[in-house]
Image (tube, rainbow, N blue to C red):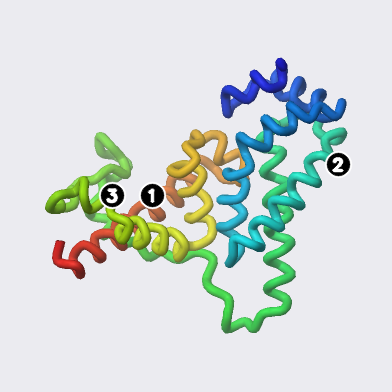
């Protein structure tokens, strides 16, 4: 039960992580189910950022859970349990991508990152201003925004734009804005500096906003 209660917070402390790990080593199915229920979709969304289909993401996550169970004896508590789990997931995803790249022509490989922003950098406050990264020139208001944002078509446009982001931007956006993880935890999971995480998040958000504004303009909304 102590292991399950630890899952009430994403940022479990080391003692709680050790309790969960001990329960898993003891074969506690309830502890595993609690862990699975809380993090399966988070792991899948992250895996989906590395591969081209839900089926392959499911395969990667399945392999990740298997590796977690088989490797729990090797968890030493030097990092958070969730960070350790994500390191396994990322190794699985990167291994799969490496196999895909070896079997794909070079012309089919997209650039990992680019400097394109969906909105001009001038529309955001600079690092030495009051609110770095926030809007300096806000986007124009949309007509009937509640209907627009809730419409299935707008959501599909946003989903499509998210899928087209560079890999690391997509992963950071998914972890921060979809799963609600704090910046420090995302940095630890992905091995990013605080500055790199901030830049990836800013660029990803700007591109999504730009894509959504383009959709609104084209639709004449």
> Residue 210 — which label?
none
- Asked if labels 2 and 1 touch by Cβ distance under 8 angstroms, the answer is no
In depth, the one of 129 and 97 nearer the eye is 97
- The residues tagged by marks 3 and 1 sit, at their Cα atoms, a distance apart of 23 Å
- The residues tagged by marks 1 and 2 sit, at their Cα atoms, a distance apart of 37 Å
Query: Is 164 situated above or below 141?
Result: below
Q: Is residue 155 left or right of residue 3?
A: left
Query: Is 125 situated above or below 105?
Result: above
In the rendered image, residue 99, in percent from the top left (x then y), is placed at: 74, 70
- Asked if labels 1 and 3 touch by Cβ distance under 8 angstroms, the answer is no
| Precedes in sequence: disc 3 or disc 2 | 2
**Tag 3's secondary structure?**
helix
| Precedes in sequence: disc 1 or disc 2 | 2
- The residues tagged by marks 3 and 2 sit, at their Cα atoms, a distance apart of 43 Å
Residue occupying the point 43% across, 59% down: 162
- Nearer the viewer's eye, disc 3 or disc 2? 3
Residue 49, picture quadrant:
bottom right
**Tag 2's secondary structure?**
helix
Q: Which residue is mark 2?
A: 70
In the rendered image, residue 108, in percent from the top left (x then y), is placed at: 58, 80
Residue occupying the point 59% across, 65% down: 53
Query: Is 218 situated above or below 91?
Result: below
| Precedes in sequence: disc 3 or disc 1 | 3
Q: Which residue is mark 1?
A: 202
- Nearer the viewer's eye, disc 3 or disc 1? 3
Q: In the rendered view of the protein, which quadrant contains the N terminus?
A: top right
- Nearer the viewer's eye, disc 1 or disc 2? 2
Residue occupying the point 61% across, 50% down: 44
Residue 219, picture quadrant:
bottom left
In the rendered image, residue 137, in percent from the top left (x then y), is placed at: 17, 49
In the rendered image, residue 139, in percent from the top left (x then y), is placed at: 18, 52
Q: Which residue is mark 3?
A: 150
């Amino acid at each position: 039960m102590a292991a399950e209660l630890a899952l009430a917070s994403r940022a479990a402390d080391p003692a709680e992580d050790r309790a969960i790990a001990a329960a898993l080593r003891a074969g506690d199915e309830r502890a595993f189910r609690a862990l699975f229920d809380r993090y399966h979709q988070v792991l899948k969304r992250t895996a989906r950022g590395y591969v081209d289909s839900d089926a392959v993401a499911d395969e990667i996550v399945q392999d990740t859970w298997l590796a977690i169970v088989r490797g729990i004896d090797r968890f030493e508590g030097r990092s958070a349990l969730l960070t350790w789990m994500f390191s396994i997931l990322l190794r699985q995803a990167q291994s799969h991508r490496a196999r895909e790249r070896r079997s794909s022509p070079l012309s089919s490989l997209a650039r990992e990152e680019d400097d394109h922003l969906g909105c001009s950098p001038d529309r955001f406050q600079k690092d030495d201003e009051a609110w770095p990264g926030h809007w300096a020139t806000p986007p124009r208001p949309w007509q009937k925004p509640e209907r627009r944002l809730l419409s299935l078509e707008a959501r599909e446009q946003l989903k499509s734009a998210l899928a087209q982001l560079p890999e690391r931007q997509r992963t950071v956006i998914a972890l921060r804005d979809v799963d609600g993880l704090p910046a420090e935890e995302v940095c630890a999971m992905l091995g990013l500096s605080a500055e790199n995480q901030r830049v990836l998040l800013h660029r990803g958000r700007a591109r999504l906003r730009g894509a959504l504004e383009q959709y609104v303009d084209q639709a004449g909304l």
